[in-house]
């Protein structure tokens, strides 16, 4: 449920920071506005299911490309395409976003009425069959093999009637409630996953595609070389944890180490969309201290032992010498979507009023 809440929040915000090394960019389409507009129309018809025989589509001219925030070291540019999709049952605004000319996300917003009123509620099997059609539509449009893995794993879930399936390279997770949420994660180093390196699809109970997010052709793993062990990470974090405890007359009661792959969101190492291995060392104290918190975290790059940030939980500070804002890492990609989505919807509605 926690993953679903995070996903739904990201869908509401619409976009996230994304990147990929130039040699890995999709060659299906370039960054020209004409190509992006063409892909947007194909996506609405072939993937989202809004064919012109049943829906009216009013597409706005692409806005952008705009230089993305927090990409000073390695610049990245976003382009947004807004449209209104309507039929006799209702209408909705949709936004498609592209990063450096590559598809990033699609979202359906401001729904008035019910665009899918003619369709009945779908059962689990019917929803998965619809999902396979959507995923194959993405594979055909973007010519990317990882969508084939997504489709194959959905087929496995359909056969086994399970909400989880995996192969050597990908892990599929499904949540089937009032809506169908699916995420297909690329395995990093054969066992780890990151929400940034994933494909995600959300559909209504009637099979209406409400969002699609693709981080596979944008985010990239910079390295899987881990040189810092759990014990070494705890030793590196120890002085920070003890110093804070002494300053607040506290005693350490427990220490936990968590390994994961995270983005370089504050550009400490160059590209804010690059993914690196990290250790998060969190210590708990016997009583509240400064900021009225009882735990302290130190985040360490697991490939070079450098400290990424540290501080009481909720009040992370960047590593010494880094002039980035004192924000938790995951708040950085969240800031971009708010601005991008608001801008896209505002510009689209402004054109409609004119």
Image: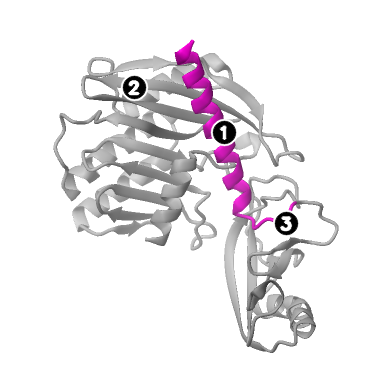
The stretch of residues the image draws in magenta is: 325-354
Q: Is residue 316 left or right of residue 107?
A: right
- Label 2, secondary structure: give it: strand
Image height check: is 209 above or below 177? above
Label placed on residue 171: none
Q: Which residue is mark 1?
A: 340
- Label 1, secondary structure: give it: helix
Residue 231 in the image: state x and y as whole percent.
Answer: 67, 81
Q: Which residue is mark 3?
A: 326
Image height check: is 72 above or below 231? above
Contact between marks 1 and 3 (CB within 8 A): the answer is no
Q: Is residue 336 left or right of residue 323?
A: left
Image height check: is 154 above or below 28? below
Disc 2 crowd, CA 10 A, few/some/many (<14, 14-19, 20+): many
Q: Quadrant of residue 230?
A: bottom right
Would you say residue 133 is visible in this rendering?
A: yes
Q: Residue at x 73, y 48 (%)?
A: 267
Disc 1 crowd, CA 10 A, few/some/many (<14, 14-19, 20+): many
Q: Is residue 218 left or right of residue 303?
A: left
Foreground residue among 216 and 82 = 82
Residue 209 in the image: state x and y as whole percent.
Answer: 31, 36
First-in-chain label (2 vs 3): 2
Label placed on residue 85: 2
First-in-chain label (1 vs 2): 2
First-in-chain label (1 vs 3): 3
Q: Quadrant of residue 203?
A: top left
């Amino acid at each position: 449920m926690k993953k679903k809440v995070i996903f739904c929040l990201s869908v509401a915000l619409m976009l996230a920071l994304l990147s990929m090394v130039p040699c890995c960019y999709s060659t299906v389409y370039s960054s020209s506005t004409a190509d992006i507009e063409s892909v947007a129309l194909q996506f609405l018809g072939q993937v989202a299911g809004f064919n012109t025989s049943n829906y009216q589509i009013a597409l706005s001219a692409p806005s952008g490309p705009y230089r993305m925030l927090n990409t000073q070291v390695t610049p990245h540019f976003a382009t947004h395409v807004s449209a209104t999709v309507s039929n006799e049952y209702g209408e909705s605004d949709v936004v498609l976003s592209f990063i450096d000319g590559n598809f990033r996300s699609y979202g359906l917003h401001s729904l008035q009425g019910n665009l899918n009123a003619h369709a009945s509620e779908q059962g689990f099997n019917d929803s998965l069959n619809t999902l396979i059609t959507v995923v194959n539509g993405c594979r055909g449009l973007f010519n990317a093999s990882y969508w084939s893995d997504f489709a194959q794993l959905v087929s496995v879930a359909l056969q086994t009637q399970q909400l989880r399936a995996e192969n050597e390279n990908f892990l599929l997770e499904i949540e089937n409630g009032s809506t169908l949420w699916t995420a297909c994660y690329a395995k990093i180093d054969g066992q780890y996953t990151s929400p940034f390196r994933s494909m995600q699809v959300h559909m209504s109970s009637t099979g209406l595609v409400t969002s699609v997010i693709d981080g596979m052709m944008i985010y990239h793993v910079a390295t899987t070389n881990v040189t810092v062990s759990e014990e070494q990470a705890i030793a590196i974090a120890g002085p920070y944890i003890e110093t804070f405890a002494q300053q607040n007359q506290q005693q350490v009661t427990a220490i936990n180490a968590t390994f994961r792959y995270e983005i370089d969101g504050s550009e400490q190492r160059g590209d804010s969309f690059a993914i690196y291995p990290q250790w998060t060392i969190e210590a708990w104290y016997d009583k509240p201290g400064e900021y009225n918190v009882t735990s302290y975290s130190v985040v360490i790059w697991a490939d070079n032992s450098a400290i990424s940030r540290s501080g009481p939980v909720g009040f992370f500070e960047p590593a010494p010498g880094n002039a980035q804002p004192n924000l938790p890492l995951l708040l950085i990609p969240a800031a971009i979507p708010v601005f991008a989505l608001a801008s896209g919807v505002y510009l689209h509605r402004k054109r409609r009023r004119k």
